[in-house]
Structure formats: C-alpha cells, structure tokens
Image (cartoon, grey):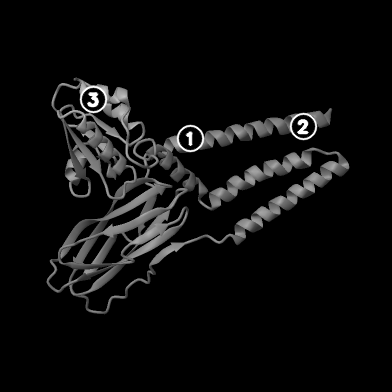
Amino acid sequence: MPRRRTVQVIRTTRRTLALLLWSVVAIGILAVGQEPILVFSLTDTQIEIPQGGEMVVGLRIENGSVYEAEGIEPFLEIEGLVVQAEPEEIESLPAFEDATIVFRLSASGETPLGAVSHVIEMLYTYCIGEQCFQFFEDIPLDLLIGPPATVPVELPDIVPTESSTQTLWIDLGVLGCGVLLLLVAVVIRRRMGLRWPLSAVLILFVLGGLTYGVFLNQHEQAQGIGAVLCTSCVGIEEAQHGMPELTSAGMEAISAIDQEIELLVFYAVWCHACPFAKAMVEAVATHNPRIAYRFVDVAQEPELAERSGVIQSGRTVVPAILRVDTGELIFGAEKLESRLIDLLEDGS
C-alpha cells in the first residue's frame, strides 16, 4: 500500500510539473509580444564630454534568439562632435551571444555647452535560412558638453568585441553529472526493483534544468524565441526562386479588371523574396494595360514606406504591395498570385 501511494504521488507530481512547464512556455510567448530580437544597452546613458576633450561609451548587443543576426551597423551623427565606432559593423552575431561596439566621441573647443539628446540608430538583418527581416532600433543617448577639463579625463576601459561565447565545459559537466545520476537510478531499479529512484532523478532533471536555465538567462532566451514567433507571422517567409508563372484562371481574372489601378511594390536589397514579388507584378501588368506599378526601394524612400504601413514600429516588412486608391496592403510572396488578384478585384 505505501508503495502504491508513492507511485501515485510521483505520477501526480510529474503531471503537475508538465502542466507548469507548458504554462510557463505559453505565458512567456504571450508576454513578449513584439520585443526586439536584439537587446541593446549602453554602459552609460548620460555622457559628459569636456570642450576639446573626448569620452567613450560602450554599446552591448545581446542576441537572445535562436538564429544569428547579420549586418549589425550603428549610425550616430552629432553636430559639433567627431564620432568613431569600433567595430563599424558586426557582420554576424550568433544565437545567444553578445558583442560590444565602442563609440569614441570627441568635442572641439567650439562645441556649444549644454545638454543634448541624440539616438543611436541600429540597423540589422535577421534571417532564418533564406527568410530575412530587417530591424531598426533607436537607442537614446544623452550628452552633456561641459567646459574644458582642468585635469586630464580618464577614459573608461571598454574593449570592443565582435562576439563572445559561453564556454561549453560547464554545460558538459552538468550534463555528465545528470547522466551519471540517471545510470545509478537505472541500476538501482534493475537490481532492487525500486522505481522511485528513477522517477526522483527525472524530477531532479526537470527542476535542475529550470534552475540552471534561469542561471544562464535562458528564460530571456525563451522570450527572444517568442518574439521571433510573433514577428515571423508577417513578412518572414521562404524566398521564392525562378520566374512566376500565372495560371490560366489567374490570367482571365486579371484581364477582366476594367478600372485603372496603380500598385506600389516595396522592396529592399537584402530581401530574398522581393525579386519574385516584383516579377509577379510585372507579369500581372503585361496582361492588363490598366494596371500600373512602381517599384519603391524602402531604403531610398523610408517616409513613403512608413506612411504606407510597410515600416511598422521601426521594423520593415518586405516584399509589400500597396494598392494606391484603396490603401490596401499585402505582404510576402507566398501564394502571391491569388492574394494579388484579390487585391486587384477588391472594389472593382
């Protein structure tokens, strides 16, 4: 009887732990919403620079997601200051790694005194295989230009880094201890016929994994994954290859449109699916002279892209096709023929 009760308690405990784990995952994904993929933090948000002097500030970049970020490039221009960034660009930041960009800010003797506010504009591309998405993030930076220093100003020691990885030795050691405990529990079960040691080790695995994950900030990594899941709903999709071919039914529907329609096709040089979308619109326009189109590079016309809804909360979603007269917008290249025809027929 006691043994049956013990087994029942263990089963109930495991079910409770499983439910708790799924609840934590669900809440984590729902809570993060549209959080940035990369997390930026300054060593100091308020920098004091003497006239004729200089100061350095470090920008830490943490990738809390499961894929690497590419082309991480800072933009900072301040009137009256000379700004140097090292490195000027980080080509790649792997998953769960971090890097540091150091800004050296130099003021001339004629730089006006007083406090000024600026932002560091960060541009980076996030790709999942051939699925790419571009982000713009603004990091506030407050500066105070003070009088010339009477004594030399000691600059903080900040070392720029491309990326830094966590060592695997601790992970391997923890995993080795867990495997050893599991083997011991299996031996006890076979030789003594006791089941509770194996169940206890499994429970310890779950609790130990959660504790170790929190220690390594993997709960924040889970938030990054949740953010990826949220942002990948729109605008991140596999690149289309080759030239699009319209179906016979599609060509008939396009030819039947009897009103003048103008389309704006938003694209970017880093977008893998954009050439397919551009070619699809070109193919559609050849079957109906009433359909006009114009290609818009979001990098060249960002204000138009933002007004049109292509840039949302500082993030760019391409390819995107806008019908000018209705303001309706479609994203991506998946099943583009049918969605484009629906866009053209709406209100026709």
> Image quarter for residue 108?
bottom left
Work out whether mark 3 precedes mark 1 in sequence or the reverse, and give the earlier one. 1
Residue type at the position of mark 3: Ile
Residue type at the position of mark 1: Ile
Quadrant occupied by the C terminus: top left
Say the numbered circle drawn on residue 315: none
Say the numbered circle drawn on residue 27: 1
122 horizontally vs 39: left or right:
left
Q: Are marks 3 and 2 in contact (CB under 8 Å)?
A: no
Quadrant occupied by the N terminus: top right
Residue at image position (22%, 56%) is 118
Residue type at the position of mark 2: Val
Residue at image position (38%, 35%) is 233
Q: Residues within 10 Å of mark 2 (few under 14, many from 20)?
A: some
Q: Is residue 178 above or below residue 56?
A: above
Q: Are marks 1 and 2 in contact (CB under 8 Å)?
A: no
Work out whether mark 3 precedes mark 2 in sequence or the reverse, and give the earlier one. 2
Tell me the distance, in whole angstroms, between the alpha carbons under discs 3 and 2: 67 Å
Where does residue 295 sit, x and y in percent of width and height? Answer: 20, 42
Q: Nearer the viewer, mark 3 or mark 1?
A: 3
* Residue receiving disc 2: 7
Q: Are marks 3 and 1 in contact (CB under 8 Å)?
A: no
Q: Secondary structure at mark 3?
A: helix
Residue at image position (28%, 36%) is 280
Q: Residues within 10 Å of mark 1 (few under 14, many from 20)?
A: few
